Amino acid sequence: MVQVNERGAGRRVDAYLSLRFSDWSRTAMVRFIREGRVHSDLRGALKPSSTLAAGEVLRLYIPGLAPEAPPPPLPAVLYEDEDLLALDKPAGLLMHAVGQKWSYGLVGLARDARPEAAIDLSHRLDRETSGVVLLTKSAEANRRMKELFQTRKVGKSYLALVRGSPAWDHTTCEVPLGAAIGSEVELRRGANPDGDSARTHFTVLKRLPAHALVACRPFTGRTHQIRAHLESLAVPILGDKLYGQPDDIFLENLRVGPTDRVRAAVGFPRHALHARAIVFPHPMSGQALRVRAPLPADMAEIVAGALPTWAPDAPVEPEPG
């Protein structure tokens, strides 16, 4: 399933799909469309010349693009009413299906599970981050919920397993964040005097022999804020391939996958960051709500005393570059 974005509105479907999946030529896409392998939820089977609308949902039955396995179940529902749906996103699940290789996305799973609702995201989590994701079930609820985020009326808290032992029990980091100075990785954020203001409060909840469990409360919403701030405090998140590592570790994982060198440096299949709770006024009623997600098993085992491991048979797809 692919949802057409604003940039795709008004484009021919053959042109749009050949740009979206650049491993396939436009000629190949024309052939697939003529074979009836591309359907719109609005119009059924399409023609190569069909013009797309923003928000239109396309279903692809193309060999190599269509999923080879059935969809995973909808993640655990943490809260639901007529306007909202809160899910406990597992690590590794994308928010939207993206990239050249098919991956199921949380939004698509929710739309299939709630076909009567106009499901949309009100915020995002990185692929490797687990925990609370809040979706809306109508356009008006989505507009109001995004307004609450923009006006900072939504409180979020996270749990992170960090490498090493913090020199503090409580601290607030206010390092401004922008493009990481001296890094060849465009995605990377870091301390930058010309960057955006950022503020995160941290509390150590438990100290382990080589790690610590830290509660994180961001007061601003900068890209990779918690990850970059913990790196700046010299206690990067366990399993993070981008922060707390030299650029070449991230680039090696991106280009060829989790080699023995990457595994040895990183030590865990994903960055151990979990969205624990979200607190906000209901977008329609104003009622105060708090939604929480339990600590996932992979992090809970370490908190209970297990050593972090990254088995050779536990591949993780690289973070988008």
Image (cartoon, rainbow, N blue to C red):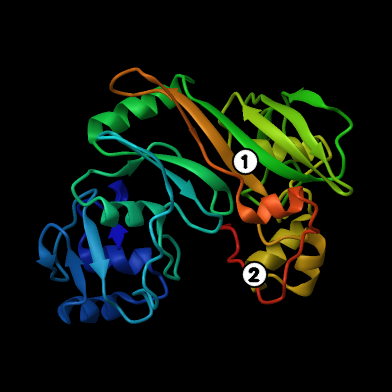
- Determine which residue is flagged by label 1: 224
Instruction: Tell me, yes or no, whether the two marked residues, 1 and 2, touch with CB atoms within 8 Å.
Output: no
* View extreme (front): residue: 304
Position above or below: 88 against 74: above
Q: CA distance from mark 1 to mark 2?
A: 21 Å
* Residue that label 2 marks: 255
Give the residue type that dot 1 points to: His
Q: Residue at x 39, y 78 (%)?
A: 68
Please tell me whether residue 126 is drawn above or below residue 102 in the rendered image.
Answer: above
Residue 128 coordinates in the image, percent (x, y): 58, 54
The residue carrying pointer 2 sits among few (fewer than 14), some (14 to 19) or many (20 or more) residues within 10 Å by Cα, namely few
Q: Quadrant of the C terminus?
A: bottom right
Tell me what residue is drawn at x 73 percent, y 67 percent: 310
Q: How many marks?
A: 2
Q: Is residue 68 left or right of residue 207?
A: left
Most foreground residue, 294 or 281: 294
Observer-side mark, 1 or 2, equals: 1
* Crowd class of label 1 (few under 14; some 14 to 19; many from 20; radius 10 Å): some
Horizontal relation, residue 225 to residue 8: left or right: right
Name the residue located 41 percent from the left edge and 57 percent from the top edge: 105
